[in-house]
Image (spheres, rainbow, N blue to C red):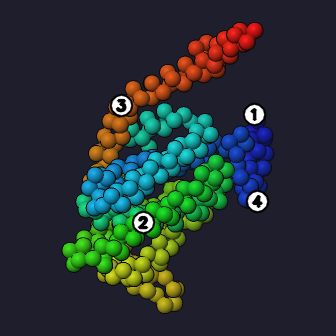
């Protein structure tokens, strides 16, 4: 393809983006657009799958059967979200095996928030309220992102995440209204998860290397700093309502801007976690690699069964149909 033809296709593509048209897998797209979406969608999928691990730590220790069932349902939802997103990513020409290998080798990233430990039951509430709350703020705009399969997958993901956020808030509210020890547990979880939840929305706009291009392609509709401000404005009143204190002594409401002003975040900690030096980075990847290796026999058995019963194999449907026809004759 000549340089002139490529330039013409890029102009057509940019015009479609400007008109808010959805780009579908078989449409022409710049290679950088394809690679950017593979990076972001796969990172999102990895985050859903790895995000099951800190919560799975509390399945056997949930305080009641009701809480255990709700937690199991939530973790199952996260697995489903990962599968939707891997499927969306595959439409861009990358295989599921490649995506898994990138995660297991450390080449691909996932959300930094899941590299922190879950020390108490209150952490289940903090994750649902804060982590899923921040995720919803980030993900709702993605339902209108320019790449069709990603946008459509996000519709269901966001609906289910809204339940997760409410479940987490309900756990925190119950603890805050309980005994002094339970309220202290809730406050401790808020203290530990507040700042990581703010940082999970990504580096500042000035430090982000992807935001400008992602905004141009309408992969993102809001910048990291805009999303972070929205999260703070939404969450602080919720904390006040249940009698918990945001662990930021500089936090104050600006009457002129109608926004909360908050303190500087520890970006050195953020980048250390992103680079693999967080409290649980090694444990998370090790757990995923072990699960992949231990599940090989299940995948092999499933593939063997599928091949045996495929209508395209002698052992499968065609031979059965032929036998049925012979018997009928």
Q: Which residue is at a point 57% across and 63% down the rendered structure image?
A: 140
Q: Say which element carries label 3.
A: helix
Residue under label 2, please give it: 167
Residue under label 1, please give it: 1
- Vertical relation: 186 (above or below) 110: below
Of marks 2 and 4, which one's residue comes earlier in the chain? 4
CA–CA distance in space, label 1 to label 2: 53 Å
CA–CA distance in space, label 3 to label 1: 43 Å
Q: Say which element carries label 4.
A: loop
Residue under label 4, please give it: 19
* The residue positioned farthest toward the bottom in the image shown: 255
* The residue positioned farthest toward the left in the image shown: 181
Question: Tags 2 and 4 in contact by the CB under 8 Å rule?
Answer: no
Q: Which is more foreground, mark 2 or mark 3?
A: 2
CA–CA distance in space, label 4 to label 1: 26 Å
Q: Say which element carries label 2.
A: helix
In percent of width and height, residue 84 lies at: 55, 46
Q: Which is more foreground, mark 3 or mark 4?
A: 3
Q: Quadrant of residue 142?
A: bottom right
CA–CA distance in space, label 2 to label 4: 38 Å
Of marks 3 and 4, which one's residue comes earlier in the chain? 4
> Within 10 angstroms of label 4, few (less than 14), some, or many (20 or more) residues?
few
- Vertical relation: 240 (above or below) 313: below
Q: Could you say which is closer to the camera, residue 329 or residue 103?
A: 329
Residue under label 3, please give it: 293
- Vertical relation: 104 (above or below) 134: above
């Amino acid at each position: 393809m000549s340089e002139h033809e490529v330039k013409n296709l890029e102009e057509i593509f940019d015009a479609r983006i400007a008109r808010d048209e959805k780009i579908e897998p078989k449409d022409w797209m710049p290679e950088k657009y394809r690679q950017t979406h593979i990076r972001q969608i796969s990172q999102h999928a990895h985050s859903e799958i790895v995000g099951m691990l800190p919560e799975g730590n509390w399945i056997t220790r949930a305080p009641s059967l009701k809480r255990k069932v709700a937690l199991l349902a939530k973790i199952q939802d996260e697995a489903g979200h990962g599968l939707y997103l891997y499927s969306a990513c595959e439409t861009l020409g990358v295989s599921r095996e490649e995506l898994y290998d990138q995660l297991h080798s450390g080449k691909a990233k996932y959300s930094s928030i899941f590299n922190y430990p879950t020390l108490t039951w209150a952490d289940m509430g903090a994750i649902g309220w804060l982590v899923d709350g921040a995720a919803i703020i980030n993900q709702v705009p993605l339902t209108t992102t320019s790449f069709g399969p990603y946008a459509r997958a996000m519709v269901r993901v966001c609906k289910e995440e809204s339940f997760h956020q409410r479940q987490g808030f309900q756990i925190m509210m119950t603890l805050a209204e309980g005994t002094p020890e339970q309220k202290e547990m809730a406050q401790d979880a808020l203290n530990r998860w507040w700042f990581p939840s703010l940082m999970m929305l990504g580096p500042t706009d000035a430090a982000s290397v992807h935001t400008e291009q992602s905004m141009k392609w309408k992969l993102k509709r809001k910048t990291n700093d805009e999303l972070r401000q929205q999260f703070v404005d939404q969450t602080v009143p919720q904390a006040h309502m249940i009698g918990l204190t945001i662990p930021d002594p500089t936090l104050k409401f600006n009457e002129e801007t109608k926004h909360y002003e908050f303190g500087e975040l520890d970006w050195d900690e953020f980048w250390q976690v992103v680079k693999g030096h967080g409290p649980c980075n090694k444990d998370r990847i090790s757990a995923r690699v072990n699960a992949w290796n231990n599940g090989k026999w299940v995948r092999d058995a499933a593939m063997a069964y599928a091949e045996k019963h495929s209508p395209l194999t002698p052992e499968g449907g065609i031979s059965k149909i032929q036998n049925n026809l012979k018997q009928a004759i």
